[in-house]
Image: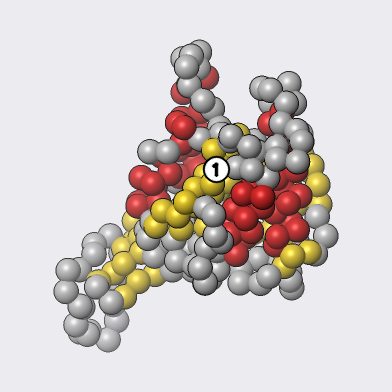
Amino acid sequence: VELLAGPRPLAGRRVLITAGGTIERLDPVRYITNDSSGKMGFALAESARGLGADVTLVCARTDGPPPPGVRVVSAESAEEMYEAVMSRVPETDFVVKAAAVADYRPARRQSSKMKKGPEQLTLELVRNPDILQAIGDWKQAGAAEGGAGRRTPFVVGFAAETGDTERYALDKLKRKRCDLIVANDVSQAGAGFGTDTNIVSVYGDEGLVAALPLQSKRAAADRIWQLAIERASSPAA
Ligand code: CTP
Ligand code: CA
């Protein structure tokens, strides 16, 4: 990989970032979602743009508008996000998966508003596709075929955890074959969903790469890009 350096190290690079929380619809007016605000993904997009990248932001539900100067693709549900991401991965240099993708969706989507009925109602949910896993598997398959003529993006995953953050994050990194994983303990004040600040630890194959202190999501994004660029340009990557 040629060295990425200078004030615009991502010039000419295509970056794909996902942001926000997916919406999994039950009927035309009801859905399941999560607390993701999209702020971390937006900060990463803004930072990448400042570093010269051509940025595509795949957005689920977010608080507020995306930053200017990036290409925005809307994807409401996990399945839509899967399509939006997988169709673009082959022409991408860096993939950053900051979105909070729902693990499950309602098994059936009613076409008209559900009526109330019995005292108890059980919702049946089914697993969503795992997008980060699919990217990892795609990279692996390409490597197995010799990788001729194929770009293999540098992949940064996220992990929002409570409890044994390091173990869960490293497990996800290996299972999903990410190059880096950014973990945050969402039970800490000033970290995670909705806030303007974050406290994250970045892990690579060898373990902890950097434990970042409490700082704005934008400052954390700059550090994450610095680490990703360093590793993508090193001969080992
Ligand atoms: N992710 C994804 N597709 C999914 C679920 C998660 O691409 N269907 C991605 C997220 O965008 C994130 C990473 O996988 O970058 C980790 O998400 P997380 O929810 O922490 O991991 P899971 O594998 O879903 O494990 P769990 O929720 O059981 O902890
Ligand atoms: Ca999950």
Q: Looking at the rendering, which quadrant does residue 94 occupy? A: top right
Residue 192 seen from this side: yes
Looking at the image, which is closer to me, 201 or 121? Answer: 201
Residue 227 seen in render? no
Whether residue 132 is situated above or below residue 200 in the rendered picture: above
Q: Is mark 1 within 8 Å of ligand 1?
A: no
| Quarter occupied by residue 15 | top right
Colouring mode (rainbow / by chain / secondary structure / one colour): secondary structure
Looking at the rendered structure, the secondary structure element under dot 1 is strand
Image location of residue 158, percent across then percent down: 61, 51
Residue drawn at point x = 47 percent, y = 51 percent: 71
- Residue 219 located left or right of residue 137: right
Image quadrant containing the C terminus: top right
Residue at image position (38%, 56%) is 75
Measured as percent of width and height from the top left, residue 230 is found at: 75, 35
The amino acid type, in three-letter code, at marker 1 is Asp
Side (left or right) of 72 relative to 28: right
Q: Is residue 36 above or below residue 164?
A: below
Measured from the top left, where is residue 81 in percent x and y? 40, 51
Side of 137 where 224 appears, left or right: right
Residue drawn at point x = 45 percent, y = 31 percent: 90
Task: Please determine whether, in this image, residue 88 is positioned above or below residue 169.
Answer: above
Q: How many badges with numbers are in the image?
A: 1
Q: Which residue is mark 1?
A: 54
Q: Nearer the viewer, residue 233 or 137?
A: 233
- How far from the left and from the top, in percent, is residue 78? 39, 54
- Residue at 51% across, 35% down: 92
In which quadrant will I find the N terminus?
top right
Considering every residue shown, the one lying at the far left of the view is 112
Label 1 CA crowd tier, 10 Å (few <14, some 14–19, many 20+): many
In the rendered view, tell whether residue 149 sits above or below residue 34. Answer: above
